[in-house]
Amino acid sequence: MQTAVIEKRLSEALCLAVQHLEGLSSTEEFFWGWEVPKDPSFGDLSSPVSFRIAASLKTPPQVIAQKLADKFLTYCEAAGIASWVDRACAQSGFLNVYLSHTVLVDVVREVLRRKSGYGKRQNRSSAAINLEFVSANPTGPLSVAHGRQAAVGDVLARLLRSQGLRVTKEYYLNDEGRQIEMLGRSLKARYLNELGISEPFPEEGYHGLYVIDHAKKCVRRFGSSLKAAPLRRFMELGMQDQLLEIKSVLKKFGLQFDRWTSQRWLRTSGRIEQALQQLQQKGALYEAEGATWFASTRYGDDKDRVIRKRDGELTYLAPDIAYHLWKFQKGYQKLLNLWGPDHHGYIARVKAAMKALNLPADRLLVRITQLVTLTRHGKPVPMSKRQGEFVTFREVLDEVGVDATRFFYLMRTLDSPLDFDLDLAKSQSQENPVYYVQYAHARICSILSKSRLPLRQRLRPNLNLLCEPEERMLLRWLFQYPITLRLCADAFEPHGLTVFLRKLSESFHVFYTKHRVILDDPQRSAARLVLIRATQGVIANGLSLLGISAPRKM
RNA sequence: GCGCCCGUAGCUCAAGUGGAAGAGCAGCAGCCUUCUAAGCUGUUGGUUACAGGUUCGAUUCCUGUCGGGCGCACCA
């Protein structure tokens, strides 16, 4: 039996019970589904429906809950699902439902039957989501902040796909403009320096050592033949080198984008001018002080924005507008962008542009991931790309490993600043919670490999023997897994999955300490083997969604 | 000055569209002859920054105050 089916059928029974309360005209608007109480003593599923209808019934919620509790089993019986519920009772106004052993045990069979498909849903709609994230400028290595976006975006995409949605992971590549020019100038200066030619370093150039490394590489590759090469050549070389580096780190991290959209392509294909023309036609542009302005205040922004500078160059806003216009034209139903905290001010102006173009701005959703601050020896590490003082995403990956890095990044909500303690992450990685989860998985695998029970007994055990409290807790968590996935996906917030896995693992460790799986009693042993096999399946399933390995040995 | 985010146990943080305050670390006391001790058990720790408001109910929503982070370009 699937969790969603259990919820749905029980909801129907509850709906009937509510409908038959005296004095209620319509129940349609009063039903909000089930909650899973944090405290298991409050049952497996809980409904706050009494609170919603208390006012219109002019009855205290506690009284309503009691009435519902009295009748709930009767309605379950009528719906033919009486065997699913042990008891229903009213507590503090909630209707708390305690699932029967039968239905919980059936969840185990569901896990084993659907294997890695457990908790996932089939295609719900043809709507496609465009998820844009990282999108770091190819002027330097990825920072730890980009790493956070990479982790969040990648897992978000996996979560949404697990819920039957089509997702395109997209990287917006800023491959031209002033910063690329500055990278080219920096590279050129370093290159000439390597050749022993004195060349002043550009004032706002990139001071990072990686530029010097690349300059040395250019000397090895081209000798002095680039001495008189135009700036454009260095811009191209510098950018391509950074792009290779970025792609290589992302690959190491286990993240592959479905689409790379380049700003240069937007321009050369005429899409930027096209977008400007459309804005012009809508009367959203005007000339002032020698520049062209986008009248974004008309569409909710707090000030108008320059879109073409006095010198005739476009600001970054122009390609950004063209980019979002293009994404809507591609037919995406929803544009989901992960941006850094320094970009929150841009939401209003991009949305304003969408409104000006008569596009559905409410289908553009921007999630801001808060800052990542690095600390070393208890002190914050200064981060400046231009000055070249920073710890890169690659360095963290190399030191901490993919698994721990991913888990670490996903342990906080997006809204919460992430304090990345390098000493802790690097030197004490055994204490990272990811090992707690992986250890549970490895322990289970170890037991399974030692079991000598014949296969047939493993497949047809008497699961009714799983009646210890620790066994029931495990069953409860397995039951909850699909709900967790749905909630995380709906909220565009992956960190709940790490929280879930830690709790599931804890339940297993507690079970493991108290009970033996391999016993002289073949019946009980078989039942427990099936239980831990299902637990292992869900842990592996969850870790896989996080892009983290599930080791069989540790 | 304006905007966004944050403020929960000594520290780092959780807490399903408002729903019944939790974990880890640190401290203390225990548990390996037995499927992996990277584990488990017990214990200490709270006016959820403060003041109001809405609500049956507020850590959650609204207003204000205080404190912290980030952003407010004809830079990207």
Image (spheres, rainbow, N blue to C red):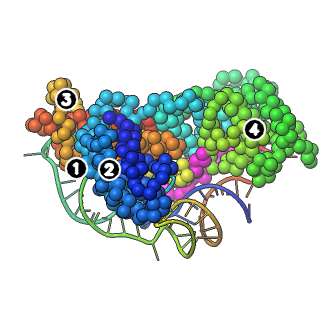
- Amino acid on which disc 4 is placed: Asn
Q: Secondary structure at mark 1?
A: helix
Task: State the residue at coordinates (89%, 40%).
Answer: A311
Q: Identify the residue shown where x is 85% and y is 35%.
A: A281
Q: Residues within 10 Å of mark 2 (few under 14, many from 20)?
A: many
Viewport quadrant of the C terminus of chain A: top left
Of the numbered discs 4 and 3, the one sitting upstream in the chain is 4
Task: Determine the CA span between mark 1 and mark 3.
Answer: 22 Å
The residue beneath circle 3 is: A460
Location of residue A544 in the rendering, given as x and y in whole percent from the top left corner: 41, 34
Q: Which residues are magenta?
A: A367-395
Q: Are marks 4 and 1 on the same chain?
A: yes
Q: Which residue is mark 1?
A: A469
Q: Quadrant of residue B1?
A: bottom right
Which callout, 4 or 3, points to the residue nearer the camera?
A: 4
Name the one closer to the observer, A396 or A267.
A267
- Chain label for disc 2: A
* Dots 4, 3 in contact, CB < 8 A: no
Circle 2 — which element?
A: helix
Q: Is residue A373 magenta?
A: yes
- Disc 3 residue type (three-letter): Arg
Q: Nearer the viewer, residue B66 or A86?
A: A86
How far separated are the C-alphas under marks 2 and 3?
33 Å
- Evaluate whether label 4 is on the same chain as label 3: yes
Tell me residue A478's x, y (percent): 33, 41
Residue A498 image label: none
User: Comparing marks 2 and 3, which lies closer to the viewer?
Assistant: 2
What is the number of the mark on residue A72?
2
Sequence-first disc among 1 and 3: 3
